[in-house]
Amino acid sequence: MKFIQNLGRSLMLPVAVLPAAAILIGIGNMITGFIAEDNVVGIFLTTAGLAIIGHIAVLFAVGVAIGMSREKDGAAALSGLVGFLVITELLGPDAIEAMMGVEEAPAAFAQIENVFIGIISGLVAAWMYNRYAQVQLPNALAFFSGKRLVPIMTAAAMVVLSGVFWIIWPIFYDGLVAFGTAISGLGATGAGLYGFFNRLLIPTGLHHALNAVFWFDTVGIDDLGKFWAGEGELGVTGRYMAGFFPIMMFGLPAAGLAMYHTAKTGQEKDAAGLVLAAGFASFFTGVTEPLEFSFMFLAPVLYVVHAALTGLSLFIAAAFQWTAGFTFSAGFVDYTLSFFTPMANQPYMLLLQGLFFAVLYYFLFRFLILKMNLKTPGREDEENLAAATAGASGGTKDEKTANQAAGIIEGLGGKDNISSLDSCATRLRVEVKDMEQVNEAKIKQAGAAGTNVVGTHNIHVVVGTNVQFVETEVRNQINE
């Protein structure tokens, strides 16, 4: 579980680069769409954005290598690139045709430069860094000791792994194609099933693997890449992204409003500080974790309903062929940037769909919360939400961050109980020595949106989009 969570965090590094592509492509398309198709500035910006999208597999190789290595060192990143180049050249169509003595390589090898291979390359590079970065060779070979040894060992490992993948990659690829084809062959229903399972896998972080099948060029669907490249079929390309916009921009914020309106007397103001701020983040940026984690474990029935509604949204958008795309997440920023792309088909209808889902989310969540007496924020029996946000209130931003970090450390059992600390887009990922010393109530009192125990020694603390500043402050206080 720790490995999976660390991988999920590492995948956020290359994903965080994609908004740059969205901005460049979005502005470029707006210029070519409103001024002239051959406008130099528009073509210049669009091409720059496509350069990022077109090399996403390399970004994953480098990003995973950095994220999974102990010191997040540049040598790991270089090794990730080395590993990716080795396997993609050895298993590229030209090399395979020469080695097999055939005129045309199997289709699987034409798709070897994909995100999955990038992730594998990054993982191998990170493992080699963690294993060999401190190795000292005999004096005659001392120049190649330590970090210089890592890319060499990575290249050697990828040569061996390439031999293995020569055999298993076509089988694995055909299996992925069959899965993707089965879902995509279901049309709008397949899009709905994908949306449902995408949300269900959020707590585990395994949704990244599912996304890679549909969003990237792992099996040829490449919904994200084709959408921003202006390729594919109008009304179809983008169907695995479009339905998320009504949920993230309208549905989840409405769910937050329902939780605020059902908070217990005296707790409304404090509940608003959590769920409404998280709702705005969901609408504007598409970052949903702070809001989802606020009810994911407190009221899991609501989360299952949320997953089902997400599937329904993707089904509706796909059925009516309303499409829009994103590179980071389905928030207002990406929606605006994608509005003028060639593959966007009646994207304004997603706004009407969003209003429908806002009403549906609000009344369904409100009904279930009251009917089942669900313990959403502001309705806890053991503590009120005022205490949950007290640690983050008052003082300057630096003082709030310092107070929040101190409260989180105390809730985790003190600095001596923390073995390791990391973060992803919105969560602190912490390994503790003794889980019994962890006080989740104190962590929430420090201003955390929620917690998630993912193993005997591992816990997530949902902080929000300012998690990197909280992580830095926690580290500083631990090292004092």
Image: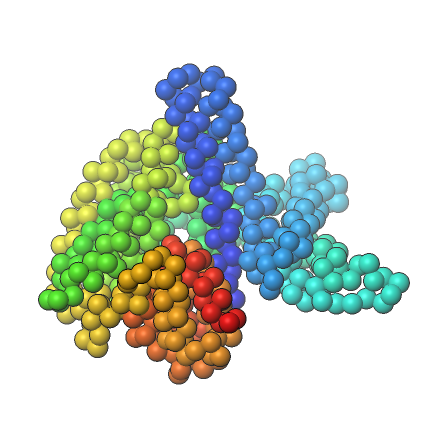
Figure quadrant of residue 320:
top left
Residue sitting at 70 percent across and 36 percent down?
103
Asked whether the viewer can see residue 403, the reply is: yes
Q: In x, y percent, where is residue 115?
A: 54, 48
The reply, left or right, for residue 57 in relation to residue 131 is left
The reply, left or right, for residue 119 in relation to residue 373 is right
Residue 466 to residue 24: above or below? below
Residue sitting at 53 percent across and 38 percent down?
52
Figure quadrant of residue 111:
top right
Q: In x, y percent, where is residue 379?
A: 18, 69
Residue sitting at 47 percent across and 76 percent down?
415
Q: In x, y percent, where is residue 68?
A: 57, 61
Q: Closest to the observer: 23 or 59? A: 23
Residue 2 to residue 278: above or below? below
Residue 266 to residue 207: above or below? below
The reply, left or right, for residue 235 in relation to residue 124 is left
Residue sitting at 28 percent across and 62 percent down?
394
